[in-house]
Image (cartoon, coloured by chain):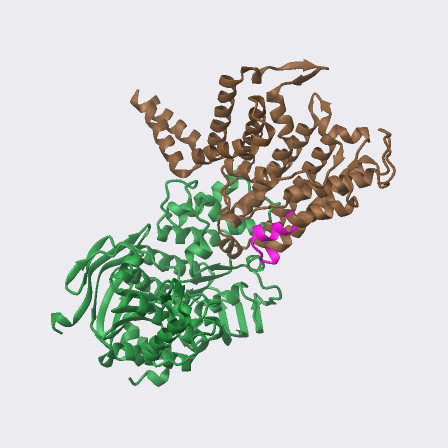
Chain colours: A green, B brown
Amino acid sequence: MSETTILLSMQGIGKAFPGVQALEDVDFALERGEIHAIVGENGAGKSTLIKVLTGVERPDMGTITLDGQVIEVRSPQHAQSLGISTVYQEVNLCPNLSVAENILIGREPRRFGRIDWRTMNTQAAGILAGLDIDVDVTRPLGSYSVAIQQMAAIARSLEIASARILILDEPTSSLDSHETDQLFAVMRKLRADGRSIVFISHFLDQVYAVADRITVLRNGRLVGTYASSTLPRLELIAKMLGRILTELDDVSRIKLASSEQQTGETRLEANDLGRTGSIEPFDLVLRAGEVVGLAGLLGSGRTEIASLLFGIDAPDTGTITVRGAAVTHHSPLGSIGRGVALCPEDRKAEGIVDDLTVRENIVLAIQAGRGWLRHLSMSQQYEIADRYIKLLRISTPSSDAPVKNLSGGNQQKVILARWLATNPDVLILDEPTRGIDVGAKAEIQRLVLSLADEGKACLFISSELDEVLRTSHRVVVLRDRAKVNEFEGEVDEHRLMQAIAGAEHAAS
Amino acid sequence: MPRPRLGAAVGRLTESKLFFPLVVLSLILLFDLIFDPAFFNLQIIDGHLYGSLVDIFRNGSTIMLLAIGMTLVIATGGVDLSVGAVMAISASVAAILINPDIKSLVTDPDLTVTPLPIVILVTLFVATLCGVWNGMLVAFGGIQPMVATLILMIAGRGIAQLITTGTRIQIFYEPYAYLGNGWIVVPVSLLIVGGVFVAAWLMTRRTALGMFIESVGINARSSFFSGINEKLVKLFAYMFCGFCAGMAGLVASSNIRTSDANNIGLNFELDAILAVVIGGTALGAGGRFSLLASIVGALVIQAITTSMYAVGVPANALLAVKGVVVILVILVLSAQVRDVVRRLVSQAPQAT
């Protein structure tokens, strides 16, 4: 790889947000005329890296070099003027205007001060023809499929910025397979024209179908950049899901000790439980004193299972039985009454209430379970809050500090405290260690095991395979929104990864 | 070490939601002291206290009532534009209950067709129903609060006119006039404000409702995940806001002894929203609220109006002048300006 083939390089990029290091010393190099995929689980730092590249966020450290010159991307507009253009997941065009207007808006050809519609339409049709797309450009954009709309967005960004670098952020998430093929054809054509494309997707099939090289990020760090032809799929998944050994080894020992105990009675049972478009019907049993791991890639249906079990969503088929009683009313409030708790995946949007104090956040669920009239007195609230701050070693200046001032790991512990305060029998933890540092991770894993020891049934969802293996007595594997396998006892990591990737890919 | 403690005390004072509305109120009164010292004159007529200061409280009672209900709605992250129209509906309901025979003018001050307690109860019930309508649209219909309450804001005055078949009904029944004009040691309207305030305070701060309202306003989804029925919480806020608007409608119509569907409560929703904003509850974002600060906010609004009249601003220029004052008040309340003031205030004791 000679220097001249590199169009853009990012070196030593670091970016911290309050409570989390989103990027740490990440290098990224884009060659001329290549399609370069960036992959990684949620929170790996993909979107932050793109935001740095497109000027939405300023990096704390590191340099960006374009065409051999060090640049500073000041804003998305500035990025466009540098020839870096982004097409987002959600198409942000005007569906009620014509295709031609959307492509040329703001740059309409004029004659005698008025828009020259005929020239405009031929120009737009010409641009689209360059992408091998033949549509009636005078019709409203909204009358076409999402794929065509996305092509129009691409055409527009090529037209405006004469973009040398095109960033496609999850462009295929709302496309069917035919539309995806259409998009890939356009991407290959652009590559042939010598443009470089950054492609972000969590569909690994598509990454392999179209990308020349793959950069893997995990927990804000660079794992590596690989040629897609030489990287077996299993190895890629291993790199995405990661292994962190050092500080976490003692967790396995605790697990060994606890798994010697007898697991208890069935606490929660799901029979043929499913919801159309969310998760295929599945069976699941959670027993007292046991941690069940839920493994699978992003979008495999992990969170959907949690939502069904906790009553966020109501199932279409099947039944949930908690301690022998069938669940008829599906709601979080009902789940509190049944002794089921959920620490949700998206801590910021679904977990903490950021302007409320640590104390209020901790007592929120127990108070909701009691109803608004049976008010916990101030002294009771402080007593509960202080107990859990001590028990979970939540580091906060006081129980009256706003929870938004705490670090990510401590916020996570506050949510855990909120649910432990309701004294649940079944605890569902959806990515409880996402975006927090390794030390806090180990602490939370140890805590989960000790909770199981106390006789709680735990469902542990994580995109880090290593973590699932370390904490779980049993592992359920999901793929493509269906339960595909269940492993008991000592789980062979290789077999587990094969199950996650799908048997048909195991050989590759 | 008295100094750090003083700094901390000043810090706590400036953190309080009450601090800035009180500062603004003091500034307005300072303005009056300079330009119209007579503003502070008090005199006793017929055993009752009169003067501009008393007027602020008496005339501010409707805005204070609206501000109490509006505080809860804004705290859930919403807004209620219909309170002025709901006041008009309440006035019409009360008037028609007292005298359903619109055509023949009955001027007997002792005559009412419906007993007064029933009049009040039915009126408040209708107003609360208006609030339930708003709450259903917002919480269960998922409609933007501003759009949802705009419906009743526009339709409400029409409904009020329908109730009285388009005529303004004069109310001669004397006991009804007590609500807005009567005195029991203090003006009756202020007793009503006090009663509603205490009820609202007990309801939100002596139960978990206040915390639920703030939690829903800050993050409705997290609240739902925590087992709070966020739809019912919102519905309650709008319902109570309707109730307060009904109270305000009773007081206002009693004050002018007329059900004037076109003018009762006109533009009052804006004053009420402004009062709550001055009281430090974030419009749009919702969250933390202070009922007392909203009351002070309402007094600020009324003090501006009363002061403008006192210094001789003509009635038709009042809105323009009020607009300028409001801009100044909002500037003082902006986060940037607040930070500067806070820094200056907390540095001052250390400098000496």
Instruction: Tell me residue B320's x, y (percent).
Output: 53, 34
Instruction: Tell me residue A323's x, y (percent).
Output: 57, 65
In the figure, residue A508 lies in which quadrant? Answer: bottom left
Q: Quadrant of the C terminus of chain B?
A: top left
Q: Residue at x 52, y 40 (%)?
A: B289
Residue B238 lies left or right of residue A243; in this view the side is right
Q: Kindly tell me whether residue A255 is visible in this rendering.
A: yes
Residue B145 lies left or right of residue B114; in this view the side is left
Q: Is residue B51 magenta?
A: no
Per the rendered image, the range of residues in magenta is B139-153
Label tally: 0
In the figure, residue A239 lies in which quadrant? Answer: bottom left
Q: Kindly tell me whether residue A205 is visible in this rendering.
A: no
Relative height, residue B183 to residue A89 (above, below): above
Q: Residue at x 29, y 60 (%)?
A: A54
Q: What secondary structure is the stretch in magenta mostly built from?
A: helix
Residue A155 lies left or right of residue A430; in this view the side is left
Instruction: Tell me residue A220's x, y (percent).
Output: 28, 61
Observer-nearest of B230 and B164? B164
Instruction: Tell me residue A397's x, y (percent).
Output: 37, 40
Q: Quadrant of the N terminus of chain B?
A: top left
Residue at the far front in the pictured view: A112
Q: Residue at x 56, y 43 (%)?
A: B210
